[in-house]
Image (cartoon, grey):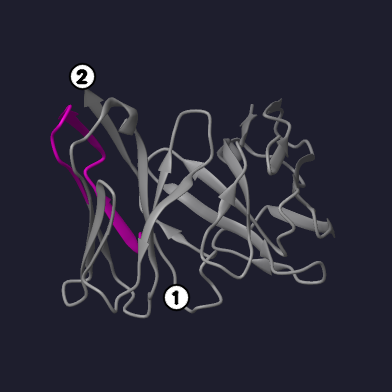
Amino acid sequence: DADVTQTPRNRITKTGKRIMLECSQTKGHDRMYWYRQDPGLGLRLIYYSFDVKDINKGEISDGYSVSRQAQAKFSLSLESAIPNQTALYFCATSDFGEKLFFGSGTQLSVL
Amino acid sequence: QQQVKQSPQSLIVQKGGISIINCAYENTAFDYFPWYQQFPGKGPALLIAIRPDVSEKKEGRFTISFNKSAKQFSLHIMDSQPGDSATYFCAASRGSSNTGKLIFGQGTTLQVKP
């Protein structure tokens, strides 16, 4: 079983729709992150959370929001999806060490 | 503004050859430099990392070379194998408590031909 699970794996939605991407982890890590990956741009940090009561904006937070429902769950929402939010989204976790553990990603297409 | 610039975008190497991927950074406050490896359909996974107090770190066939004065670091893959075919990302962060807040390079797609 995967330690960091993202759902759904693929999602197609329309412009203006609200969508939520979910992430759960069994690693027991306090720190969770959302990144997006675009061809030619690498990965960019959207939001991160160091514990249940902590939420921080990353490099590209506009148009996104997050919720840390529990230590193991961190969801990313697009309130009104737009086509340039089409990307591969990754959730990741870490403890106080240096290593990030990534999920397998959610491919989102906004038409 | 890309704070970490990675090259080349793609690389083809023969089996047994050396693969070299380069990265340059701008922010002198960066103090942690990892390399992540990503296979198709998977998330990135940490391959090797270095801090600026050393100029080189080796783990098996993978070596990071770090040049603090030039603000550059590179990944060398010795005796490249077809199983090394993947996308490689360099990254950087600053602050010992912020090693998960990474600035990534653009990525390099490596193909190792048998």
Closer to the camera in the image, B73 or A45: B73
Q: Residue furthest top?
A: B114
Q: Residue at x 69, y 27 (%)?
A: A11
Q: Which residue is mark 1?
A: B94
Q: Residue at x 69, y 53 (%)?
A: A64
Q: Residue at x 25, y 30 (%)?
A: B81
Q: Secondary structure at mark 2?
A: loop
Amino acid type assigned to the residue bearing label 1 in the image: Arg
Closer to the camera in the image, A58 or B101: B101
* Mark linked to residue B114: 2
Q: Is residue A69 left or right of residue B14?
A: right
Residue A61 seen: no
What stretch of residues is rendered in magenta?
B1-21
Q: Secondary structure at mark 1?
A: loop
Closer to the camera in the image, B11 or A3: A3
The chain containing the residue under callout 1 comes to: B
